[in-house]
Amino acid sequence: MIHNVRTHISQNEALLFERSSPGKRAYQLPELDVPPVDALAALGAGNVRAGIDGFPEVSEVEAIRHFTRLSTWNYAIDHGMYPLGSCTMKYNPRVNELVARIEGLAWAHPYQPEALAQGSMEVMARLEAMLAEITGMDAVTLQPSAGAHGELTGILLIRALLEKRGDPRKKILVPDSAHGTNPATAAIAGYAVENIKSTETGLLDVSALERIVDQDVAALMVTNPNTLGVFEENIARAAEILHAKGAMLYMDGANMNALVGIARPGDFGVDALHLNLHKTFSTPHGGGGPGAGPVAVKKALEPFLPVPRLKRSGKRWAWDYKRKRSIGRVRAFYGNFGVLVRALAYILAHGGPGLRNATVDAVMNAVYIRKRLEPYYDLPYGSPNMHEVVFSDARQAAHGVRTGDIAKRLIDYGFHPYTVSFPLIVHGALMIEPTETEGKAELDSFIDAMISIAKEAETDPQLVKNAPYNTRTSRVDEVSAARKPVLRWKGGEG
Ligand SMILES: *Cc1c(COP(=O)(O)O)cnc(C)c1O
């Protein structure tokens, strides 16, 4: 028998603070070859800190190992299927990374003179043109840093156009199935938000829209396909209704991975939309890394786009800052350039037919999951789904098992949970988005896991309710974690 074995990959990694030992350093500096300066005398007492209370002191190798071990605790798209609905957690082909690391692109500096940045500007110009083509719109800005940021930019553009017409208006309409960022955006842009209820099939209620749209409505913000994964089949009619009353149609294009190569928002009446490059166009995301939420618009909105705009000047690209109707900048410089490079690489690597295939595969995968899980999980809305499918926990709830429990149990089966309790119009929602990158074998093992859990919920509900078992920690107190987060190390007491 071996006692007191310490495994190398610690099952319960101590905090870096707990590993601290006075005097340890993670760096070594060469001996000083200039006269030393007294920091206190040079900078003044107010600018020099004696030390940081409780700051961890560890060696370089301890710091590296600590963070590397923690990184192995994360579930990632490179480990397996990540069916988090709405988030489009698809595999990111390595060729995108290779291209983003090309020296001239990776080291480009935003203050580089235009003459020396022609390649980077060409990358942005081509991406703008391709996104315009894919969406069927007239112009694109690459500046916004995320989906929500794109929404805000798009609504500010609409606002600028309406103000220019002398008709600023007061309200934005948002369906009850909307992503939470939509009403938040409308409110931040200074509009009152009015909800529209969905029909029984989970679609935009066009007759309600017809009744509600009046001289006060600036725009309707609609996700298409909506958060149930269902295509808004009356979208063109909705656009007509809005346009007839001088209002505009904003589309949340975060679900564009269900449309690319198949349908173009510009062709069904959309005036402005944002794309999530970090979803549809394959940039690694999650954990707060950089994203990009380009906005595509019709001609009427083009004069208001953020500055600077790319402009052809002879054989060269130049930045045009002199655009008097522009809403101004929405961020520093030109956008998250590395994300833009990845998106262009992804588009070029696929080509037109390849992008269309990706869309078809994404939809097929979600339909396959729906068909195979339908006998086990309640499907509250019957409309044919596209790239994602939303079940409810109604059948399992009869045994006291809720969507959150099923999600936790899924972790034991080796999968990242699906999206829990969203969209809000489905009580106890299970929102599943496989994306196109999963093959049949992976889909089948996910489906088998879900079926197995559905059976457990009937025969042994307590088993599901106490899951997960195979993780370092089981259930954490999520309410306290959200309401009373401990953000500062207090030396021992937690
Ligand atoms: C992800 C998502 C957003 C927000 O995008 P961020 O990049 O996270 O700001 C908005 N709407 C829908 C439908 C989404 O799925």
Image (cartoon, rainbow, N blue to C red):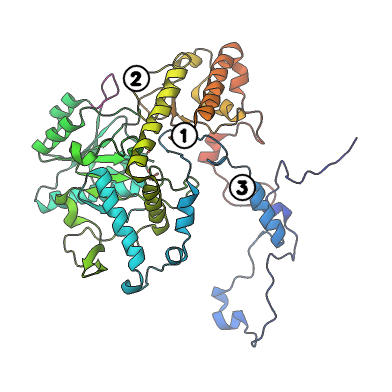
Q: Magenta segment range?
A: 197-204
Depth check, front residue: 209 or 284 = 284
Mark closer to the chain start, 3 or 1: 3
Q: Nearer the viewer, residue 49 or 361?
A: 361
Is the C-beta of the residue carrying label 3 under 8 Å from the nearest atom of ligand 1? no
Report, in whole angstroms, how far the alpha carbon at label 2 lies from the one at label 1: 19 Å
Residue pointed to by mark 1: 84
What whole-number distance in Å separates the C-alpha atoms at marks 3 and 1? 20 Å
In the rendered structure, does residue 62 fall within the stretch colored magenta?
Answer: no
**First of labels 2, 1 by sequence position:** 1
Task: Say few, some or many: other residues with alpha carbon within 10 Å of mark 3 (under 14 / 14 to 19 / 20 or more).
Answer: few
Q: Is mark 2 within 8 Å of ligand 1?
A: no
Q: Amino acid at mark 3?
A: Ser
Asked where in the image residue 208 lies, by quadrant, the reply is: top left
- Circle 2 sits on which residue? 381
Expressed as whole percent of the image width and height from the top left, the position of residue 96 reads 45, 52
Residue plotted at (21% across, 31% down): 235
Could you tell me if residue 428 is visible in this image? no
Q: Quadrant of ligand 1?
A: top left
Q: Which of the pair 431/394 is nearer the observer?
A: 431
Q: Secondary structure at mark 2?
A: loop
User: Three-letter amino acid code at disc 2?
Assistant: Tyr
